[in-house]
Image (spheres, helix red, strand yellow):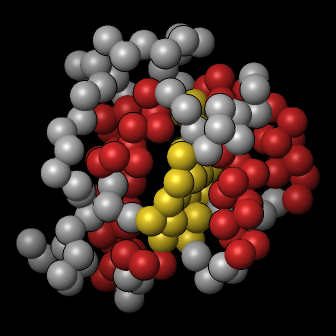
Amino acid sequence: MKNEMPGNKLRTIKYPTWCPGCPDHMILESVERAIKELSREGYKKRDFAMSCGVGCHGKIFDYLNISGTYGLHGRAIPTGIGMKIGNPNLNVLVFAGDGDTYSEGMAHFIHACRFNPDLTLIVFDNQSFSLTTG
């Protein structure tokens, strides 16, 4: 594929199991397209890392073939900040759910806004403060 990072498949062999119509599918596709577009500018797969929280959104970890870790519920942001501090050259993508960010992780979210670390936070809002898994 023309946009594919040479020798590095970006998607894993895992099939997404999110509910039909869930916006998580669109987020996965958008992130994949963005990383592929950046690969045209010289970025490599190893330049990216992700931090994921607990919940439906965290399953993106299973579908994107980049380095990363699952964090504790509400702790994806500080985990991502730690990754960035450990390797400032990484492009850190933090994937968190609405509960992860605006409930359990609210203090981390506020402090991340205050300190403005160089990372990308993507909040998955399934409009339901629950683990849907449906």
Residue name at image x 76 percent, y 33 percent: 105
On the picture, is 12 further left or further right than 26? left
Would residue 1 be seen by someone viewing this image from the given angle?
yes
Residue 91: quarter of image = bottom right
Q: Where is residue 58 shown, x and y percent of the image? A: 47, 38
Q: Position of residue 30 (x, y in %)?
A: 35, 50
Among the 4 quarters of the image, the one containing residue 12: bottom left
Is 30 on the left or on the right of 84, as rendered? left
The residue lying furthest to the bottom in this view is 42
Numbered-mark total:
0
Residue 98: quarter of image: top right
In the figure, 49 relative to 16: above or below?
below
Residue at 69% over, 54% down? 79
86 w.r.t. 128: above or below: below
Which corner quadrant holds the N terminus? bottom left
Could you say where residue 15 lies in the image, as x and y percent from the top left?
18, 39
Q: Is residue 30 visible?
A: no
Query: 29 and 78: which one is in front?
Result: 78
| Residue that lies at the very extreme toward the left in this rendered image | 1
Q: Is residue 104 left or right of residue 28?
A: right
Q: Position of residue 131 (x, y in %)?
A: 49, 15
Q: Is residue 77 above or below residue 49?
A: above
Question: Which residue is located at x 16 percent, y 51 percent?
Answer: 13
Check the picture and name the quadrant holding the C terminus: top left
